[in-house]
Image: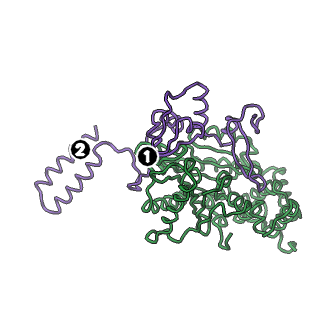
Chain colours: A purple, B green
Amino acid sequence: MKCQACGKHAAVTHVKTITNGELSEYFLCAECARRLGYGNLFAELGHSLNLLGFQPEAEERCPCCGAAWKDIVRAGRVGCPECYRTFYDRLLPAVQRMHGSVRHQGKTPDGSLPRAPEPAGKGLLLVKRRQLREAIDAEKFEDAAVLRDEIRALEGGRDE
Amino acid sequence: MSEKKKWFEYAGDDSDVIVSTRVSLSRNLKGRPFVWRMRAEEREEVLEEILAAVGNERLSVAGLFACTRMESLTKTQAVSLAERGLVTPEFIAKREGKALLSCEDESVSIAVNGNDHLLLCAMRPGLDLDGASAAADTLESVLSRAVSFAFDREFGYLTADPANLGTGMHAELTMHLPGLAWGGSLPRLAANLAGLGLSLREGAGAEANAGLYRLSNRVTLGISEQTATANLKSMAYQVVMQERAARETLCASVECQDRVFRALGVVQNARLLPLSEFMECFSNVRLGAAQQLYKGGPALDTMASVMAKAQPATLTLLMGKTMTASERDAARASLVRSAWGPKEGSA
């Protein structure tokens, strides 16, 4: 089937839209889909992997949802959270291509504070500073002196 | 639709160019397959779990959301939800097991069992990325006390489509860009923005005639919510500046002024108004209102509301009866005239 937008290339994706109060479907080629903002990079990537003859050796299936790699490629979607572990090696390049990064930054379930990349030891530094304040409040000056030196060492290490 | 004013019936910041702001978060429940791999009864369980969470009296969102099961809607009702931007056309194509939870003014909603188990969405008039992000983020934090979301240290929040991994956050601005569109500089601008991880595309369906465009972030992994919205905001300001400059030149020409006043004549006097003609006039009238080319005519803060009501399915619901195409064009003309027509000539 030809793309319904340009009429030239083969259609690889179908999109749904509302036209004059009716739900309608269009078949688009990869280029037009991208131009119109419907591109699914993952499905396209799956498509090109298939064209290159890249086939997984065995019919490995996700132990959680039972999806095989070919199901994921066909749907352009992953089966379940566990699939990201099962098919890690194959998904990683696709994810990298899409986002240019494979390391999450931002909100996490255990705290809404953003998890910015922190220099090593910074967390420890905060803990020591709190302990120092507590030691001073409790008038444990010997402990405080030790903590003060440890903090200086950590701060010095960070500046290098 | 209830009587209460909807979120889009208010004017927002920079609303001469930016029509509305939308921030959505994709989330999935831990330990369950994604929606497309689930059986009907599993989808039902997911919906029950989410309904229990939003109904949980210990949470601040209790009683805020009304649940609409998609399969209980007529086709017209479902299409009207898509016309108002509450759900995507894809969401209403297959409606089994899906539901929409929305608050009364429709500014905050949760689409259940679409591409992901939940799509939390906040909408604001004009440019309000901070407000919309905060609303979506708060809703997510509150819900996360009642349900566990699938998360991975490396990939962030896990989603069915790897394109949404990480924060799962998409921020989108609907922009009115008649100046840049007439100047022909949009393809180049879109290409430049694509290089920065943002996508600028033409509005779908009827919006394409109205000079409406969507600017949104594409990348969700490796970039925090705050950084992504800050990037989007700074680029949006640049697009706004360029659009305003283009409008200055454009509106100085008598051809442009002619288009605006002709469109004004049509919306204030037409007796039959087909959708495509309305959308084209809408764009010109909105431009005229934003640039203050006319006095006392249609005001900028009435634009979104008239546009929503003039869409075919929403209009049909408003009239409360099925109509033929020409009856609908007549109903649209009369709706637009009563909202925008000169008061004494509206009879």
Q: Which of the pair B202/B56 is nearer the observer?
A: B56
Q: Position of residue A138 (x, y in %)?
A: 15, 63
| Kind of residue at disc 1 | Gln
Q: Is residue B17 above or below residue B180?
A: below
The residue beneath circle 2 is A154
The residue nearer to you, when weighing B175 against B162, is: B162
Residue B278: x %, y % from top left: 81, 57
Q: Chain of mark 1?
A: A
Instruction: Please rate how many residues cluster around mark 1, counting C-alpha atoms within 10 Å: few if below 14, some from 14 to 19, many from 20.
Output: many
- Any mark on residue A62, and which? none
Identify the residue shown where x is 53% and y is 72%.
B63
Quadrant where the image shows the N terminus of chain A:
top right
Where residue B195 sits, quadrant-wise, is top right
Instruction: Count all numbered tags in the image, as a single digit.
Output: 2
- Tag 2 secondary structure: helix
> Same subunit under labels 2 and 1?
yes
Across and down, in percent, residue B222 comes to 46, 42
Horizontally, residue A123 falls left or right of residue B234, namely left
Q: Which residue is mark 1?
A: A105
Residue A123: image x %, image y %?
A: 29, 49
Sequence-wise, the earlier of marks 2 and 1 is 1
Q: Residue furthest left?
A: A142
Q: Is residue A149 visible?
A: yes
Name the residue type under label 2: Leu
Q: Left or right: where does residue B33 sit relative to residue B206?
A: left
